[in-house]
Image: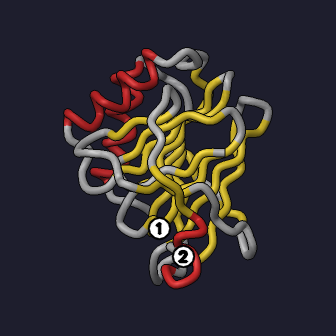
Amino acid sequence: MIYLCEREIGFDAVEIGFPSVLGCRAIVLVTNNGLFGYHLNGNLSLAKRTALVNFITTHLHGHGFRNLYAASAGAGLAADHDELRGIAAALGYTGSIYWASLPPGGSVYVHFQDIDHNTCAITSRAWNDAVDNVPGNKAAYVAGPDRAVANGGANANMFINASTAGLKAVYPTKL
């Protein structure tokens, strides 16, 4: 299990959690080896897209693309959908792309669970800073082959835990 804060890119064979998604996009590429994720804040600049694509294509498990997903508040704007198509094009991916509309009304925790290295289940719940963003859920940032920062420096701390209590299914729609 890996948790990705804003600006982080990562890989996990089974699960990726995205703490505190509000205006951000939780982007996940399912491969035949697991899940690649990116906690995109702001617009997808060329530098951010390049960082994501390079992370995936140079990673040991960065092949066998199956499905591309994004989750964010609302149905997403045309520009958001175009960002996903741009990622797909840069990867040479021609498969299905999905958008998962998260509930409105504040920040959420989004959880992606790999299903047979072909697709994934998406769940979410309200994010509560007072309960979720606490020292017990964080540890010092540890760099490694399965995580990177797309732009800027790494956070001093990274999430190592988030409660799964109250997660509800989110059903994506195909773009």
Q: Quadrant of the N terminus?
A: top right
The total of numbered circles placed on residues is: 2
x and y percentages locating residue 91 in the rendered image? 40, 21
- Label located before the other in sequence (2 or 1): 1
Q: How crowded is mark 2: few (under 14 residues within 10 Å), some or many (20 or more)?
A: many
Find residue 155 and name its label: none
Find residue 20 and name its label: 1
Please tell me whether residue 159 is drawn above or below residue 87 in the rendered image: below
As helix, strand or loop, the secondary structure at mark 1 comes to strand
Residue closer to the observer: 94 or 50: 50
Q: In this view, does 56 lie to the left or right of 13?
A: left
Furthest-front residue in this view: 140
Find residue 127 and name its label: 2
x and y percentages locating residue 64 in the rendered image? 60, 17
**Residue visible at 73% across and 29% down in the picture:** 117
Q: Can residue 82 be seen in this view?
A: yes
Where is residue 136, by image quadrant? bottom right
Q: Residues within 10 Å of mark 1 (few under 14, many from 20)?
A: many
Furthest-right residue in this view: 116
x and y percentages locating residue 6 in the rendered image? 37, 55
**Residue visible at 56% across and 66% down in the picture:** 109
Q: Which amino acid does label 1 sit on?
A: Ser
Where is residue 151, by image quadrant? top left
Q: In this view, does 12 lie to the left or right of 155?
A: right
**Residue visible at 72% across and 66% down in the picture:** 164
User: Spatial distance from mark 2 to mark 1, Cα to Cα?
Assistant: 6 Å
As helix, strand or loop, the secondary structure at mark 2 comes to loop
Q: Which amino acid does label 2 sit on?
A: Trp
Q: CB of mark 2 within 8 Å of CB of mark 1?
A: yes
Q: Can residue 168 be seen in this view?
A: no
Where is residue 75, by image quadrant? bottom left
